[in-house]
Amino acid sequence: MKAGIVGLPNVGKSTLFNCLSNAKAQSANFPFCTIEPNIGVVNVPDTRIAKLEELVKPERVVMATVDIV
């Protein structure tokens, strides 16, 4: 899944991005601090995967991720 964060200048988009992705995107208290887009990938934990692996025995398991821009 891919998600984007958009909004007016200086409203906390980079701060939200850093919280969601554990990244260190620059954020400061002035407009247009972040000009270039930041990209983060967040793994989506799912406790059901282990049980499904036991039942189905797939060749490989791909965990869900969210790409945040």
Image: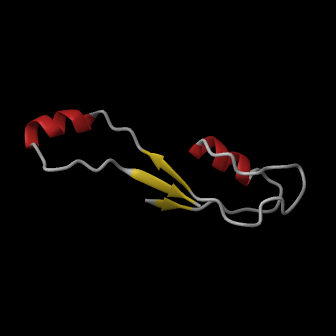
Q: Locate residue 11, reporting x and y percent.
A: 79, 53
The answer to which of 16 and 40 lies nearer the viewer is 40
From this viewpoint, which residue is outermost toward the right? 30
Q: Quadrant of residue 4?
A: bottom right
Can you say which quadrant of the picture contains the N terminus?
A: bottom left
Q: Residue at x 33, y 38 (%)?
A: 46
Q: Locate residue 68, reporting x and y percent.
A: 55, 57
**Colouring of the image:** secondary structure
Q: Residue at x 9, y 38 (%)?
A: 55
The answer to which of 17 and 24 lies nearer the viewer is 24
Q: Residue at x 70, y 51 (%)?
A: 25
From this viewpoint, which residue is outermost toward the bottom? 36
Can you say which quadrant of the picture contains the C terminus?
A: bottom right
59 lies left or right of 50: left
Q: Locate residue 40, reporting x and y percent.
A: 56, 54
20 lies left or right of 43: right
With respect to residue 29, does 2 lie above or below? below
43 lies left or right of 47: right
59 lies left or right of 21: left
In this rendering, the count of numbered labels is: 0
Q: Locate residue 20, reporting x and y percent.
A: 59, 44
